[in-house]
Image: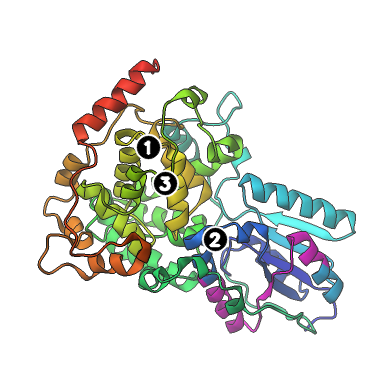
Amino acid sequence: MSDTKPIIMWFRRDLRLSDHAALSAACETGCPVIPVFIYDDLVEGLAAAPKWRLGLGIAALQESLRAKGSHLILRREGQALKVLQDLIADTGADAVYWSRLYDPQTVARDTQVKEALKSGGIEARSFGGHLMFEPWTVETKTGGYYKVYTPFWNTVKNVGVDPARATPRDITEPKVWPTSDDLDAWNMGAAMKRGADIVLPFVQAGEKAAQGRLSYFIDELVDGYGDNRDIPSVDGTSCLSENLALGEISPHQCWHAGHRAMQEGKRGAEKFLKEVVWREFAYHLMHHTPHMLESNWREEWEAFPWKTDPDSADVLAWKQGRTGIVFVDAAMRELYVTGRMHNRARMIVASYLTKHLMTHWRVGMAWFEECLIDWDPASNAMGWQWAAGSGPDASPYFRVFNPDTQLDKFDKQRDYASRWIAQGRSNPHKDALAFFDAIPRSWGLTPSDPYPEPIVSLDEGRKRALAAYQDRGF
């Protein structure tokens, strides 16, 4: 223990000990370090699955800190600034460190916190780590920000990425630990209801699980990643989005592992690196054009005649996996059972909702936010706007995926479809049946229900979307 004043290490979406710039800096001072997680209004505002998954991540971080002889202090007493000021008064701390985040709400909160703490004589320092490249450091040759992914990739692919930091050897304890809430009392999974027990087996929470995922992917899967990443029935992707979203692993760690694999000649490694940078691109755009989280990135799409009722019969059928389109329905049921959805399937269901059903991307984005355990504000918004055609780098906006031909191409044997759709099968897959255990009872759905007819024919839906594009002069 040290007699020097403690540093408050404010954890947020950086739930790890390794490659953690803020934590390392705090530990290197030799001062006592008090790790803290604050349940404030931004946490309260999270949707069901992200909030529940955050709770699991916090629990895993608690265990990691205990193993290092430290503790995670939990506080839910109001605004983050007030909690930090109370902790400073209680502990005598004279510094607060944290990792930067980039969504507008968090930036506004953190700016207020930093200004208030500094004005009170408290050292307030923010560090990188959630991204490899700070969004303001990557510019075009003319000094602007990148609006298209490929030149962004070409710019950053040869830029040196900081090496990953080791886990601090020691985290010095304070003489007296401040009081802490009990995590169970926060009941962060309340909105998940009975679905939590169904989704839980598909979760791999915490830093140790994330590192195991990365190692397995690099050792066993990355060589075939380029071919297998589009096959939803195959274990062909890293699944690290769940852990990256909460900072249980850093993008630097993913990058360096992928880069080593590329140097070893593993075929899919460069494609994996491109996906890591795709995440960076989403944050780059969110920083420079934060309106993308709420409104069309391309202003000319404001007049597009999308439907906006989140409770319409068509939207409900889409949410329930009852559109009568096999690929769409299988994907929506996978989402409800696992809290995730294969990336190829995400494109299909987003295209179907925004084009065949002519429904606003915000409706779909909100449902994904409700259901995804890997929810990420930048990636979710950019993915939906990319699929809808209203966003950056939409390629091309008038593309209307045909879910049936996509199913024939990427699920030839119908392994994915049969795993997630129970109707019409004499011996349904357990995961297909789990969907009916997870959904709200008010939906009144059972495995014995007949499989629905398409709510709109694919040809009719495509023609309707293309006609709307033409009418609006796109």
Q: Nearer the viewer, mark 3 or mark 1?
A: 3
Q: Which residue is mark 2?
A: 164
The vertical placement of 147 against 115, above or below, is: above
State the image quarter where residue 19 is shown. bottom right
Q: Which residue is mark 3?
A: 311
| Amino acid on which disc 1 is placed | Ala
Q: Which mark is residue 387?
A: 1
Q: Position of residue 333 (x, y in %)?
A: 30, 58
Q: Earlier in the sequence, mark 1 or mark 2?
A: 2
| Amino acid on which disc 2 is placed | Ala
The local secondary structure at tag 3 comes to loop
What range is drawn magenta here?
A: 56-85
Q: Earlier in the sequence, mark 2 or mark 3?
A: 2
Q: Nearer the viewer, residue 71 or 413?
A: 413
Q: Position of residue 279 (x, y in %)?
A: 47, 47
Q: Residue at x 64, y 56 (%)?
A: 42
